[in-house]
Image (cartoon, grey):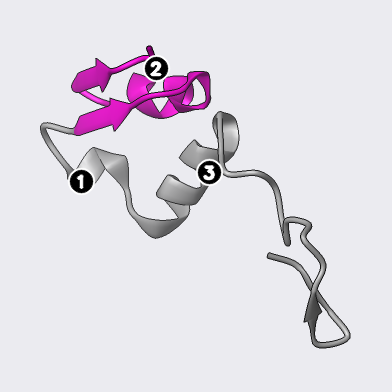
Amino acid sequence: MERRNGRLTGELAGPNCRGAEKVVRLRALLDPAAYHPIYAYGDTAGDTEMLALADHATYRGLR
């Protein structure tokens, strides 16, 4: 959450963590090439790019 003058504004402090931004944040924390196999689980369209990194991707769409 964004803080302005010591108060939460209700806005995001940075980019929304979905889609390509999710991959950017994962790569900032770890090197996917250092892990094998990679399992990933997603439940929204915003997980598509993250699931593409995985050796074993599971998508569970909302019903």
Looking at the image, can residue 53 be seen? no
Amino acid type of the residue tagged 2 in the rendering: Leu
Q: Position of residue 48 (x, y in %)?
A: 45, 19
Q: Quadrant of residue 59?
A: top left
Residue, disc 1: 34
In primary-sequence order, the first of circles 2 and 3 is: 3
Q: CA distance from mark 2 to mark 3?
A: 24 Å
Percent coordinates x, y for residue 36 in the rendering: 12, 35
Q: CA distance from mark 1 to mark 2?
A: 31 Å
Q: Quadrant of the C terminus?
A: top left
Q: Amino acid at mark 1?
A: Ala
Residue at image mark 3: 24
Q: Is residue 52 visible?
A: yes
Q: Amino acid at mark 3?
A: Val
**What residue is shown with label 2?**
62
Viewer-closest of 1 and 18: 1
